[in-house]
Image (cartoon, coloured by chain):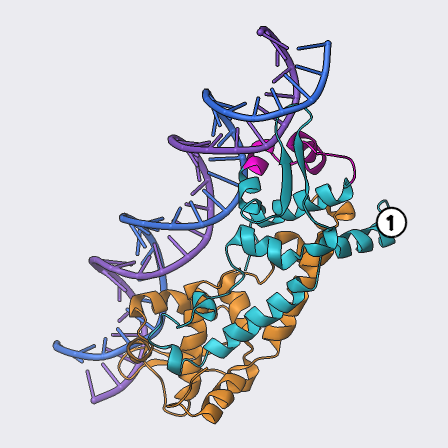
Chain colours: A cyan, B orange, C purple, D blue
Amino acid sequence: MRISTKGRYALRMLLDLAEHRGEGYIALKDIARRQEISKKYLEQIIPILNRTDFLKTNRGYQGGYMLAKDPAQYTVADILRLTEGSLAPVACVEQSPIDCVRSADCPTLPVWQGLYRVVNEYLDGITLQDILDSYQERGADNYVI
Amino acid sequence: MRISTKGRYALRMLLDLAEHRGEGYIALKDIARRQEISKKYLEQIIPILNRTDFLKTNRGYQGGYMLAKDPAQYTVADILRLTEGSLAPVACVEQSPIDCVRSADCPTLPVWQGLYRVVNEYLDGITLQDILDSYQERGADNYVI
DNA sequence: CATAAAACCTATTGACATACTAGGTAAATA
DNA sequence: TATTTACCTAGTATGTCAATAGGTTTTATG
């Protein structure tokens, strides 16, 4: 049930871009420094996000990335679905028709379908803007759980 | 976010034992045949479950396993916590103190804590008996999603 | 036009986890 | 004593994870 570094880093990277929205194109170098993540590794995560219209890019001097849309337009579910491949706890809950001979008579299938549903409902309900807002509310400096 | 075969097989094995409750000790051979899972692999899952008081065992002729408690006493969360090691989406949500220098100022931590919470709430709420009941209700033979 | 800075692309790697298989030993019953 | 079962330990092929490495292309600026 783990979220990989790919998904977690992608979220932090987009959050970093959301925080620095309005400052022009942000170089990966700066995100890497602020987030303490290898720039080379971030480079590999970018193309995954670019499979959709998440980012605007400029190459060359003064180049970098910026969010293509408003932070409220990005849900955590969207981001993780891209980077994790899927949010499904088992493969069969997102297939139709289900590629498993037992599925028609499987007592556990509803359990996985239900788990899939609650995970999606929760993550669909959180946007980059939501995360930014609750972070500001708590105060960036005395933010303790 | 995947549940491994270990977790899925453990759930099916315990569900099989719940279905055949009252029939004495059930041999692994029979569970393996009914569930179409390698008996050798099930043998490896058993000791994980035996770390708690989940099962009663008898060796030798007519030996096998039976549930140590009522099916309503086993939650899916309990079973998966044993076999998966943890249900946490990221390591830091189950540590205290958190072993991450960024945790005090991490905007994403509440997201993972919330995800952890909804997953636990959902899986804590389902017992083997619940699964059996809803399976019976739908009718074992025309059980279609 | 040359240079520097950035994105972009492809390959490789070490470590670890997954999903088993294999072969044996110990205990209990008939 | 033979059979049937659980129990134990090791091995293994495959894949995924989490990066690192080394280059090419594009673009603004001096």
The residue segment tinted magenta is A22-43
**Tag 1: residue type?**
Gly
Image vertical order of residue A49 relative to residue B66, above or below: above
Horizontal and vertical percent position of residue B47 = 42, 67
Q: Is residue C29 left or right of residue B16?
A: left
Q: Is residue A97 left or right of residue D18?
A: left
Label 1 is found on which chain of the structure?
A
Horizontal and vertical percent position of residue B86 = 56, 61
Whether residue A31 is in magenta: the answer is yes
Q: Residue at x 41, y 70 (%)?
A: B9
Q: Quadrant of residue A95?
A: bottom left
Horizontal and vertical percent position of residue D5 = 29, 77
Q: Residue at x 28, y 77 (%)?
A: B33
Image vertical order of residue B6 relative to residue A71, above or below: below
Image vertical order of residue C10 relative to residue B84, above or below: above
Residue placed under numbered mark 1 in the picture? A139
